[in-house]
Amino acid sequence: MKKVLAMLCGVAAAVTLSAAPVLADQLDEVKARGKIIVGIKNDYRPFGFLDKDAALKGYEIALAKQVAKTILGSEDAIELVPVIASNRIELLNAGRIDLILATLGQNAERAKVIDFTEAYYMMAGIELLGLKNTAIKSWGDVSGKKLCGIQGNLYNKTITGKYGAETVLFTGTAEMFKAFQDGRCEAIAFDGPILRQKIAEPEWAGTYKIALETFNYIPIAGGVRKDEPAFLKAVNEAILSAEATGVLISAEKEFSMGESEYVTKRATDAKAAGH
């Protein structure tokens, strides 16, 4: 009887093990699907935006296409899904996208829930755009002031906690800029490259200025789900390839971002390493 019970227990255990779900490797899944699904920005010039013909363009769009080309052999083997700062990690971990390339700043809190790729840009963390005659002369001056910004921005807590400002937050940049022009906030606290692009526009240049420069720079990287080492390695190799072949240097020029020392050095190092 004991032998029978032991045999039955063994069979039950085997059935249980065989019935356990097998999680597919992310890289294998992407290759089987024949396309990579990338979360990008579509209202965030110069990183990701819609041009006059409603085509997606930008620095991170160029990178996303190079990732697809390196991993799947064609830059068209890709689906670009618009995301915003407040939902991009949620969509990634829910399996709706494979990769985030959407101005994702590296920090320890995010590293608990996702894995970061190689950092491919160094962004002025936050700057302040205001009227040319603004009385704000230092970050200490924003205490008690209403500042427009974007939900999920890495620096919102610093602006309110350290500097004592009151944030008025939006999901998109178009809403944020309009709210500022409508007088709903005294200034905009947001990512430097985007604000500098805005004040370069003729209708903004005469009235507004960068009132305060950043107090910190932050590395921008891609994001993948935890515990996908093969996929992470493949994406990293693609990023290094984009750097070595000059894709990101060309994107900086194409989208009027200037020539950053960080991007130039990484391109030189990646090429020297044979990527």
Image (tube, rainbow, N blue to C red):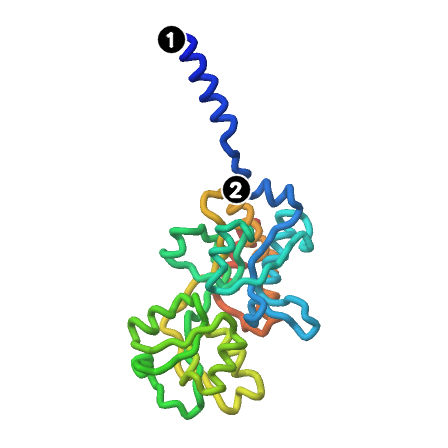
Left or right? Give the position of 56 relative to 190: right
Rendered view: 52 above or below 35: below
Residue sitting at x 31%, y 83%: 141
Residue flagged by tag 2: what amino acid is it? Answer: Ala
Locate residue 154, reporting x and y percent: 40, 66
153 relative to 240, above or below: below
Query: x%, y% of residue 14?
Result: 48, 21
Q: In what element is the residue under mark 2?
A: helix
Labels 2, 1: front one: 1
- Residue 251 visible: yes
How many neighbours does mark 1 have within 10 angstroms: few (below 14), some (14-19), or many (20 or more)? few
Label 2 close to label 1 by CB (< 8 Å): no
Where residue 127 sits in the image (x, y, percent)? Answer: 42, 76
Q: Residue at x 63, y 43 (%)?
A: 31
Compute the Cα span from label 2 to label 1: 46 Å
Give x and y (percent) for residue 186: 40, 85
Q: Which mark is residue 2?
A: 1
Residue position for label 2: 230
